[in-house]
Image: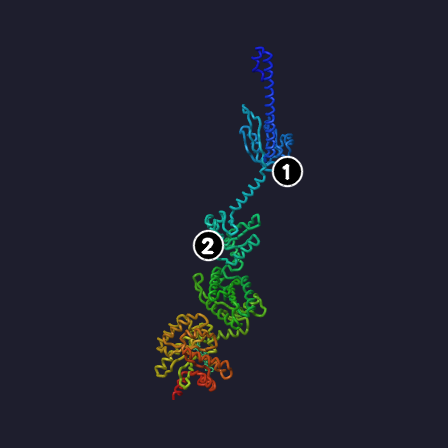
Amino acid sequence: MLLWPLLPVALRIPSPQQLREVNHELQALNDSLDQQVAERTEQLQESENRLQHVIRLSPSVVYCLHPIDNDLLPFKVDFISEKITEISGYTPEEWYRHETLWGERLHPDDAQQAIENMQRLIQQGQLTHEYQFRHKNGEFRWIRDELIVDYDDQHQVIEVFGAWDDITDYKQTESELRLAATTFDSMQAVMITDAEANILRVNKAFSEITGFAAKEVIGHNSGILKSDRQDDDAYQQFWEQLWRQGRYEGEFWNRKKNGEVYPVWQNITAVRDNNGQISHFVSVFSNISDKKAQEMEIQALAYYDTLTKLPNRRLLLNRMEQELKAARRHGLFGAIIFLDLDDFKLLNDSAGHLVGDELLIKVAERIGLHLRTEDTPARLGGDEFLVLLQANQDSVEQASEQAMLIAERMQQELNKPYILNGVPMHFTPSIGISLYPEGNANASELIQQADTAMYRSKSRGKNSISFFNKNMQRAADHRIKIESQLRTAFQQNQFELYFQPQLCADGRCEGVEALIRWRHPQRGLLAPSAFIGIAEQSDLIVMIDRWVMKAACLQLKAWRDSGFSHEYLAVNVSSRQLRQEDFVEQVEDILAETGADPRALMFEITENIFIDKVEQAGKTIRCLNDLGIRFSLDNFGTGYSSLCYLKKMPFHQLKIDRQFVADILTDGNDVAIVEIIIAMANKLNMQVIAEGVQTQTQLDVLLDKGCRLYQGYYFSPPLSVEDFVGYVEKLRT
Ligand SMILES: Nc1nc2c(ncn2[C@@H]2O[C@@H]3COP(=O)(O)O[C@H]4[C@@H](O)[C@H](n5cnc6c(=O)[nH]c(N)nc65)O[C@@H]4COP(=O)(O)O[C@H]3[C@H]2O)c(=O)[nH]1
């Protein structure tokens, strides 16, 4: 074909020379052609080699398809790279041999779509699709398949080139990431911090739960969520556990942006870096307020009476067992009070259960009025209530007195009328008391004892109080009897004032102490020891004190008017009386009413006034002192002697208790105490008086120690007003 352009030249019949030249040119041309072919072949070989390397090194499977006349799958594999064996488990030869291999091993979920894609490929010209292909070993692998069609001038498919990639690992990571993203945006708050607990990332639920937007907390320390509900020790323990064990799970109290404190259930995991060092913390938490509320509701149902909201028998028994243990451990005594409403059944039957319930609610409220926070009122069921009084008394007698006092107050409270369904009604309780600890008796046995005592009250005519213990019962009966007789004594003017002189060393009557006596219709004249203690446990002492104050002031005024006077008249003022808020006004009223001179009054108070509410007592004492009333500190040295108050309060006189005087001759310590009291009184510029002087020798010692004022049987016992006047007049003559 290359010789054709030379033909016209040949027709002109060349010379041998020309022929030789032509031949020579031809030879040169041929040589050049051969060289070109050789070079071209070499280039092709090089290119072929390069392609083989690229195909071998490619992470993708490379393949060529040939169009065939088949409706289902219009291609057949022409070439496929070796890599296919690794990804599919089948060698290229198996692929060439088995024309339907691809379609048969597609995952059922993806097969239809993948085949449809291939059918559309001819029109589309190119496509990328993903599907699962079953490896020869049976495992499905995710494949990304990218195809491109090569057409001729008539747009007929010459060949299809494709590349396969195994994307199984990528798909796995992708699904894990999706899972992580879903978790991150879950209902639970998620907070990621660095190792120093600085917040790096939070999710939507975090903002919903805490009230903090992400930008408000990112960069801040997680302490921003802390509440004061847990102390620093708790936080320290939590951090220690987290660093030691790498995880923490538990309840926490956090604070919202708006300040609200709420409980969360928190799960924190430490994330470690390649060197095993903690690099992050991932904290997942949820608000458990609702759960807590439910728990509390369940607890309330389990431990509290739904009608009255008081603890039920179960909670009471728990507390009783604890209280019993504590009482035994500390050697203290307490009591339980069993209350049953008299004739409750009658009300229930006649007025109906709703009215009965109304009464029970009111009773529960009234019972609570006279209890301290440490006591436990409970409803056992029906109309039965029980009160556990905390064991805080040193002796069983004190515990019984206290229980009696509280039981009486509750009884009085429950005796007040009730308005039920708009109608006033009256109810009484029967009360039983048992004391604990009592031998080995457990909580149930103690309740049984109080129940027995309560039935005794019922059988004694209801609305009464009984003790399980016989001795306590006797004491309580006596107390109740005296209390009721004292009330009668008021109505029948059975009280009298007796007077005991207080004399100076020269025998002159300096002052006089007013002492109450009760002229009992059956028992005769009673000293205060027979009734003052009982009166002090109820409001009777206030009535008695007021009566004494008025009687003393009337007497003082009468004596002044008749020209019979002393330096002062001493009156005993109980601490209960002095603590009354309106005591100063009461005294002012009595002074105004009787016309008595306050400067001739001396109030004798005891040291226990300073045990509590000291400020208030001090104020009262100063106010009265401003009125002109003087103060004597009675029973000095026997109780709570505070030199501090002695110095601060305006006391005029110190009274040496008669117990020191009684033993002054035999007990060196008492002599020393008396000496100290006298020295102290002198130093503080106070008068000192010794009470209970019964003998000349006692008087001599006191005189020797510097005491100048005395009271005692040696001179005179307390006397009726007439005898006292006679005694003093005799002294004067
Ligand atoms: N053994 C002995 N006793 C002597 C002697 N000289 C006087 N006494 C008694 O010592 C008591 C002195 O009264 P007190 O220390 O204030 O102690 C009084 C006082 O704390 C209280 N009291 C008496 N009258 C009243 C009163 O009107 N109101 C109040 N709140 N308490 C009163 O009762 C306590 C006892 O009063 P009283 O029985 O009248 O007893 C009186 C008196 O009779 C003596 O030489 N030997």
**Which residue, as the protein is rendered here, is positioned at the far bottom?**
733
Left or right position of 55 against 664? right
Circle nearer the N terminus (1, 2):
1
Q: Residue at x 51, y 83 (%)?
A: 666
Please say whether residue 278 is visible from this viewpoint: yes
Pick the quarter of the image with the N terminus: top right
Ligand 1 position by quadrant = bottom left
Q: Which mark is residue 622?
A: none
**Which residue, as the protein is rendered here, is positioned at the far front?**
17
Q: Residues within 10 Å of mark 2 (few under 14, many from 20)?
A: few
Image position, residue 70 (x, y; %): 60, 27
Left or right position of 104 against 363? right
Looking at the image, which is closer to me, 316 or 152?
A: 152
Q: Is there a contact, CB below 8 Å, between mark 1 and mark 2?
A: no
Please say whether residue 492 is visible from this viewpoint: no
Image position, residue 716 (x, y; %): 44, 85
Residue corresponding to mark 1: 138
Residue corresponding to mark 2: 260
Q: Is mark 2 within 8 Å of ligand 1?
A: no
Left or right position of 478 against 24? left
Looking at the image, which is closer to me, 166 or 560?
A: 166
Looking at the image, which is closer to me, 376 or 361?
A: 376
Residue 146 vs 153, above or below: the answer is below
Mark 2 residue type: Glu
Q: CA distance from mark 1 to mark 2?
A: 58 Å
Q: Residues within 10 Å of mark 1 (few under 14, many from 20)?
A: few
Mark 1 residue type: Gly
Pick the quarter of the image with the C terminus: bottom left
